Amino acid sequence: MKKVLFAVLPLLLVMLLSIAPRASYAQCTLCKNNVESARTDKDGYDISGLNKGILYMMAAPYVMGGLVGFFWYRNVRRKRQQAA
């Protein structure tokens, strides 16, 4: 049973990843409108870091969750060491 599971699981993972989109360049409507207006105007906004800013905002909740998990794990580990 384990051999079958270890043979099928990587295959399913590869199939799932091949279906997933490679890259996503989606932006919110407001950001998209600012980019389009900056392209048409000579004195438009500086939009050089817009996509990186969106990526930072997207990553922030995951970093916060990771920090909460890390501190929770560290606190539990300290309590177990003190109890032993």
Image (cartoon, rainbow, N blue to C red):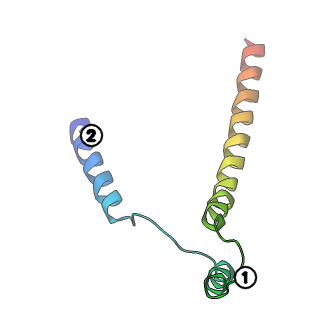
The quadrant in which residue 2 appears is top left
Identified at 67% across, 47% down, the residue is 63
The quadrant of the picture occupied by the N terminus is top left
Which residue position holds label 1? 43
Identified at 69% across, 54% down, the residue is 60
Q: Secondary structure at mark 1?
A: loop
The quadrant in which residue 18 appears is bottom left
Q: Left of 57 or right of it: where is 6?
A: left
Q: Which amino acid does the dot numbered 1 rest on?
A: Asp
Query: Total label count?
Result: 2
Q: Left of 26 or right of it: where is 46?
A: right
The quadrant in which residue 46 appears is bottom right
Estimate how packed mark 2 is, as few (under 14), some (14 to 19) or many (20 or more) residues with alpha carbons within 10 Å.
Answer: few
Q: Left of 24 or right of it: where is 10?
A: left
The residue nearer to you, when weighing 68 against 83, is 68
The residue nearer to you, when weighing 2 against 19, is 19
Q: Left of 48 or right of it: where is 4?
A: left
Estimate how packed mark 1 is, as few (under 14), some (14 to 19) or many (20 or more) residues with alpha carbons within 10 Å.
Answer: few
| Separation of marks 2 and 1 at Cα, in angstroms | 58 Å
Which residue position holds label 2? 6
The residue nearer to you, when weighing 40 against 1, is 40
Locate residue 27, reporting x and y percent: 59, 75
The residue nearer to you, when weighing 82 against 20, is 20
The quadrant of the picture occupied by the C terminus is top right
